[in-house]
Image: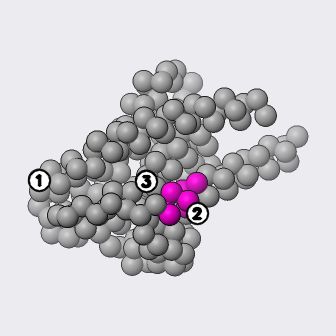
Amino acid sequence: MMQSMAIKELTRTALMLAVIIVLGLFPGLPVGFLPVPIVLQNFGIMLAGEVLGAKQGTLAAGLFLVLVALGFPFLSGGHGGMASLFGPTGGALLAWAVAPLAIGLTLQHAWFTATWWREWLVVLVFGVGLINLAEVVWLATFFHFGFGQALVAELVFLPGDVLKAILSVTVARRLRKIWAVR
């Protein structure tokens, strides 16, 4: 029985890793005044935390980042390598390692009853908020944007990220129902 559970966890983690990679096939939309494009992959990162939980979701995101660091062109636009981790998108990528952990830990607490709206708020705060804040700090610190300038520039991502959070909660709730049956 334990081996069966381990195989299910491994399979689900691998599937989520594949989803994050496939989302990278969609090219990022460039934002003229920022060196950071609008991408779909953060949807996969949020979904990993919701569906897999803290441990497995973080593992999927971490494996993805290791593969990118090794040079696999899995980032949106076919980018990869260590330079990607230290370039303009580095803040978001670092937050991708933490976001599934924060989302998963919050959702799995016994005191937390996850209605659709509460789950969406968790994803909004620990997915969208955490990733966007990391981008702001990264751009302000390493790319000499003023903090206020980076914060205002980051607002361009907010509408799409809110939609990705809605999609993430909707897909996650459906996937959990499907996986609970099997």
Q: Is residue 61 visible?
A: no
Is 20 a magenta residue?
yes
Residue 89, given in percent of the width and then of the height, sits at 33, 65
Q: Residues within 10 Å of mark 1 (few under 14, many from 20)?
A: few
Determine which residue is flagged by label 3: 40
Residue 122 image point, x, y percent: 42, 33
- Kind of residue sitting beneath label 1: Gly
Q: Are marks 1 and 2 in contact (CB under 8 Å)?
A: no
**Where, quadrant-wise, is the N terminus in this rendering?**
top right
Please report the residue visible at 49 percent of the width from the left and 50 percent of the height from the top.
45
Nearest the camera: 3 or 35? 35
Q: Count up the numbered dots.
A: 3
User: Distance between the Cα atoms at labels 1 and 3?
Assistant: 25 Å
What is the span of residues highlighted in magenta in the rendered image? 19-25
Q: Which residue is mark 1?
A: 148
Q: Secondary structure at mark 1?
A: helix
Above or below, comparing residue 131 to residue 138 in the picture:
above
| Residue 16: percent from left, percent from top | 61, 52
In the image, is residue 79 above or below residue 149? below
Pick the front one: 177 or 136: 177
Instruction: Tell which tag, 3 or 2, sits nearer the viewer.
Output: 3
Residue 147: quarter of image: bottom left
Q: Is residue 85 above or below residue 50?
A: below
Residue at point 35% right, 73% down?
Answer: 86
Crowd band around label 3 with a 10 angstrom C-alpha radius: few (<14), some (14–19), many (20+): many
Please indicate whether residue 4 sits to the left or right of residue 91 in the image.
Answer: right
Query: Helix, strand or loop at disc 2?
Result: helix
Precedes in sequence: disc 1 or disc 3: 3
Q: Viewer-proximal residue, 144 or 110?
A: 144
Q: Which residue is mark 2?
A: 63
Q: Secondary structure at mark 3?
A: loop
Tell me how far mark 3 sits from mark 2, CA to CA: 18 Å
